Image: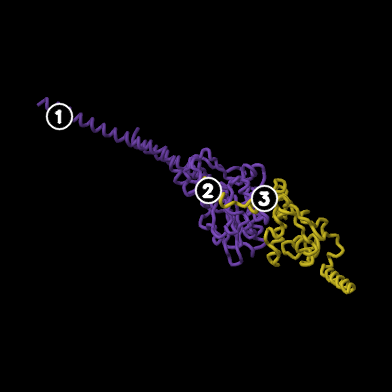
Chain colours: A purple, B yellow
Amino acid sequence: MKRRDFLKGCMICGTASSLGISKKAWGSGSFEGYPEGMGVLVDLTRCIGCRSCEAACNKEQQLPEPIVPFDDQSVFEEKRRPSEEAYTVVNRYEQKDGPVFRKIQCNHCNEPACLTSCFVNAYTKTKEGAVIYNSKVCVGCRNCMIACPFNVPAYSYSSAFNPIVKKCIFCHETRLKVGKPPACVEICPQEALTFGHRKDLIKIGHERIKETPDKYVDHIYGEKEVGGTGWLYLSGVPFEQVGFDNTLGNEPIISNVKEFLGTVPMVLAIWPALFTGFHLLSRKKGHGDDHGQDAHATKSEQEGGKK
Amino acid sequence: MYAKKNWLIGGILMLALSAVPPVCQGMNMPDSITLDSLVQLYDKVKFDHTKHIKLIKDCAECHHHTTGTLVENPNCIRCHKNSSETKVVACKGCHSAQPFSAETLSEKNNKLYHQDKPGLKGAYHQNCMGCHTKMGGPTGCLDCHPRNKAGDALYNSGDHAPKKTQKNTASHGH
């Protein structure tokens, strides 16, 4: 093979494979959730901070006994986050017009960063919309905890022998799978949590904003954030004032890495061939030189012999 | 003395009756309603209908366009400007006790309006709590419905409150 043909071949292969890969990566970025995926619309203007959702979650998921009763309001003195002992927590934010309560749990992203970051595929986004976790294949690397833009997954550090990642699973096994709303939604007295198909909830959310524009900030948090989340939020005060991260952007977390990840197969496929080619070429050239020297030597020897 | 007392009672009754809005007079409505949809966790609530009528006077405040005066809410007026009174007036007649069941969800999808209609529990609490907050009525959970034993168990409260010592040993055990 001529050197020029080899390089040409490399160029063509490289371009073709990189085009193919970028197309595939683009496809993964535009996933908008399963069409029948369920979600919950959380209306912060309705929440009264009764913590019933926390109690219901505790019983449904058979979590350990809490430190204080679920009707104890003293927990609001500090900002809590979900833990291995509580998959959902409610925090209180003092505002001008009285306290605003915000429930935190897994947001069940359309394109979960935890799932993306997991190299053993322990996470699954089910067709019902839940992001569930298989502890049997988890190796405990906790990449998901770092990847989650909402700081949701917790780790059972208390377990010495079998620590696992713990987070809200949308009551998938016991309820969602059989068409029932999660326990927190069912118990909420104020219907601050509305369960339904994600696409319907977005319509309902916009409808509420339209009908009572003075009551709400004109935004549904989670409609577009990080590629869209199953849990959506309406608020009467700016989201950043009640603990929401407004800096996440609308791109799914996978978009931050997919271009890099797209080059990995290309590197794996092209580089061995490319460098083998270089190696062969250089060896061939080197061999040729040796040959030349040998020939030269023989020639001089012959010349010497003649003399 | 007795006559005077009778006269007084009569007067009070007269006053009380005059406080009831004329639209509600003579209507077949309950004086008291037992709300028992949360009976698994809470005692039944005896809702004093008459007391609330006296306080609020306008039936439509709670019953929307189904009874009393015509609606004033601009969102409802678009359709219910001239709506006559409906046969069903009770909350549970329209607000489903199972608002998130598969059937209710598909039913909602087929409707053009009222897609965001709260369930029975949500309707009660949003209406009651909203008004109680404004009017200074009771707003604590147990102010209206005392919890039963199952309720205490769910909330880890009362007899089921976590014992501090137990918790400490449990956390040491982990």
Q: Chain of mark 1?
A: A
Which residue position holds label 1?
A: A300
Q: Are marks 2 and 3 in contact (CB under 8 Å)?
A: no
Q: Relative to residue A15, is residue B117 depicted above or below? A: below
Q: Is residue B70 visible?
A: no
Q: Are marks 3 and 1 in contact (CB under 8 Å)?
A: no
Identify the residue at image location x=51%, y=38%.
A137
Q: Chain of mark 3?
A: A
Q: Is residue B144 visible?
A: yes
Q: Nearer the viewer, residue A19 or B65?
A: B65
Q: At numbered mark 2, what does the secondary structure look like: helix, strand or loop? A: helix
Between disc 2 and disc 3, the foreground one is: 2
Residue A287: image quadrant is top left
Name of the residue lying farthest toward the left? A307
Which residue position holds label 2?
A: B171
Q: Nearer the viewer, residue B79 or B116?
A: B116
Distance between the Cα atoms at labels 3 and 1? 98 Å
Q: At numbered mark 3, what does the secondary structure look like: helix, strand or loop? A: helix
> Label 3 amino acid?
Glu
Distance between the Cα atoms at labels 2 and 1? 90 Å
Q: Where in the figure is residue A211, as x and y percent of width and height?
A: 67, 61
Q: Is residue A118 left or right of residue B73?
A: left
Q: Chain of mark 2?
A: B
Which residue position holds label 3?
A: A186
